[in-house]
Image: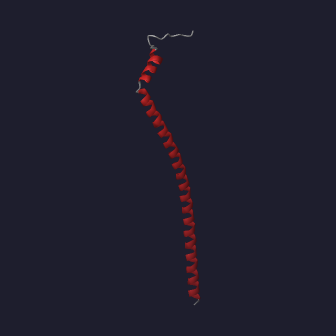
Amino acid sequence: MKNRKKSRKALFMLAAVILAISVLYSAVQIYELKSTSASLDEQRVELENRKQELEQEKDEIAQKKAYMQTDEYVEDVAREKFGLVYSDEIVFKAK
């Protein structure tokens, strides 16, 4: 009878130790998952911001492309780079 009590007590202690280890392991895993989740959330926010910036840049490029296909752009470039003027214009240069 005494042996039975000792073996039950030993079995109970072993089960308690295994349970404690399992709980501790689970707690560590939960902490690591929360940390990873927070890091991924930050990364998602950064990527969403970058996506918005790139979409805005894409829109600006599309607008510039449309402008570059106009006669107004050709005229502006001819005036700025080549100094071309209409025949009825007078050009004043500052010294």
Coloration mode: secondary structure
Residue extending furthest toward the front: 88
Seen in the image, is 50 located left or right of residue 70? Answer: right
88 relative to 25, above or below = above
In the orientation shown, which residue stands out farthest toward the bottom? 1
Vertical comparison of 36 with 62: above or below: below
Which quadrant is home to the C terminus?
Answer: top right
On screen, residue 26 versus residue 64, left or right, reads right
Q: Nearer the viewer, residue 21 or 39?
A: 39
Residue 58: x and y, percent?
45, 37
Q: Position of residue 83 (x, y in %)?
A: 46, 14
What residue lies at 55% left-to-right and 50% top-to-bottom? 42
Quarter of the image with the N terminus is bottom right
Residue drawn 58% across the image and 77% down it: 13
**Image label count:** 0
Above or below, comparing residue 34 to residue 47 in the picture: below
Where residue 19 appears, as percent x and y from the top left, is 56, 73
- The x, y position of residue 84, in whole percent, is 44, 14
Rendered image quadrant of residue 17? bottom right
Give 32 or 80, whichever is nearer the viewer. Answer: 80
Residue shown at 55% from the left, 58% from the top: 34
- At 46% from the left and 10% from the top, the residue drawn is 88
